Image (cartoon, grey):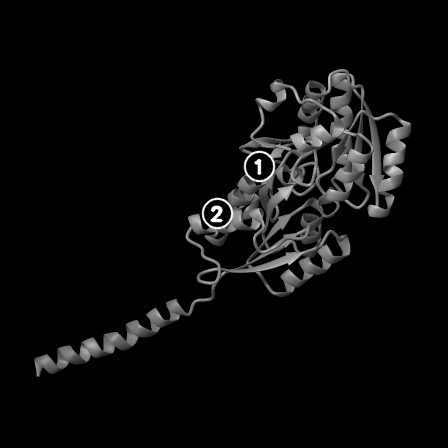
């Protein structure tokens, strides 16, 4: 009789325990949205860096986390559309790359947490109150790109001694353009280099911008990183006009930009996964201090230098993290 009672208790316990275990196995998988301003392929280094960062925190896409990838394809109207779509899907959070994409996500929701993976200046763009105390529903990584312009001008002066005038090519559609211009003008005043600012709306205006650079006898050109879709055309125009170029992204070197100096974007995407993990575990984004770049990198394209008839001094090459040879 006692044995029958014990077996009955065990059987009853199993009925209680099994549904709990089954419920745990059927628990909804967290779904995050990733909104990029520029186009991206499935093998994009930044996307892979985010996946790597997530795996380091125990998340594997398709197993215990779902990712909704969206691209604005370089268009502000599509950024707003894609941000609205992610909000409609009720994602747990949105990872935003590009100031325009982050702006679209910010306007789309004040409730869903937003993790910045790649924006020029989180404070200057008004996404957070401060790096230490962001407040609201936004946190992540700020690239400090406008402040990087001073270092770029110093590299240009080392690479091209005697340079006195530098042009800047920016986008009228990017809300961060003014921050780049302000940073350039401050650095130019400090270094005694005159600056020429040219803001364009689309690729049809590139020819006119380069004609203006020729008229003003610009000695070099700094290219805003928003032009990922057009960087090859810009590099070709610059080479044709015998104009050395500088930008902020490592991946701009291969299309032909001469000097590429800026924060390591792959590392910043990987670090964005830290914020994703902490928010999924219950942290409030407004309580998570915004991170700044941990590593900057310089890539020199000697193939472009040869086409321009330039010899890059060893003082610059010695600092390079990567060199593209002819």
Residue 178 at x, y percent in the picture: 78, 36
Residue at position x 53%, y 50% from top? 48
Residue 105 at x, y percent in the picture: 67, 53
Q: Is residue 207 above or below residue 90?
A: above
Q: Is residue 237 above or below residue 104?
A: above
In the image, which disc is placed on residue 53?
2
Tell whether 319 sits left or right of 312.
left
Tell whether 23 sits left or right of 137.
left
- Give the CA distance from mark 2 to mark 1: 14 Å
Residue at position x 89%, y 39% from top? 208
Tell whether 117 sits left or right of 190.
left
Quadrant of the image containing the C terminus: top right
Label 1 crowd (10 A; few <14 / some 14-19 / many >=20): some
Q: Residue furthest right?
A: 215
Label 2 crowd (10 A; few <14 / some 14-19 / many >=20): many
Give the mark nearer the N terminus: 2 vs 1: 2
Residue at position x 49%, y 61% from top? 30
**Which residue in the structure is indicated by mark 1?**
264
């Amino acid at each position: 009789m006692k044995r029958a009672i014990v077996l009955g208790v065990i059987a009853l316990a199993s009925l209680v325990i099994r549904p709990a275990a089954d419920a745990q196995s059927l628990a909804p998988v967290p779904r995050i949205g990733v909104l990029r301003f520029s186009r991206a392929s499935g093998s994009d280094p930044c996307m892979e860096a985010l996946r790597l960062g997530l795996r380091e925190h125990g998340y594997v896409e398709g197993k215990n986390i779902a990712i909704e990838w969206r691209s604005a394809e370089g268009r502000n109207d599509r950024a707003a559309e894609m941000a609205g779509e992610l909000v409609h899907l009720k994602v747990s959070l949105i990872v935003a790359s590009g100031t325009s994409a982050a702006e679209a996500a910010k306007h789309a929701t004040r409730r869903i947490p937003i993790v910045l993976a790649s924006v020029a200046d989180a404070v200057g763009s008004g996404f957070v109150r401060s790096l230490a105390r962001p407040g609201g529903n936004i946190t992540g990584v700020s690239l400090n790109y406008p402040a990087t312009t001073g270092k770029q001008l110093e590299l240009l002066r080392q690479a091209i001694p005697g340079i006195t005038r530098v042009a800047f090519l920016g986008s009228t559609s990017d809300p961060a353009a003014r921050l780049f211009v302000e940073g350039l003008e401050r650095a130019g005043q400090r270094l005694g280099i005159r600056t020429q600012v040219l803001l364009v709306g689309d690729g049809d205006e590139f020819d006119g911008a380069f004609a203006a650079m020729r008229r003003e006898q610009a000695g070099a050109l700094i290219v805003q990183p928003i032009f990922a879709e057009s960087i090859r055309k810009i590099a070709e125009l610059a080479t044709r006009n015998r104009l050395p170029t500088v930008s902020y992204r490592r991946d701009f070197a291969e299309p032909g930009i001469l000097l590429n100096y800026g924060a390591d974007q792959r590392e910043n995407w990987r670090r964005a996964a830290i914020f994703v993990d902490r928010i999924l575990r219950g942290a409030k984004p407004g309580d998570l201090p915004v991170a700044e770049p941990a590593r900057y990198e310089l890539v020199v394209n000697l193939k472009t230098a040869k086409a321009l008839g330039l010899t890059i001094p060893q003082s610059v090459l010695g600092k390079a993290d990567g060199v593209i040879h002819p």
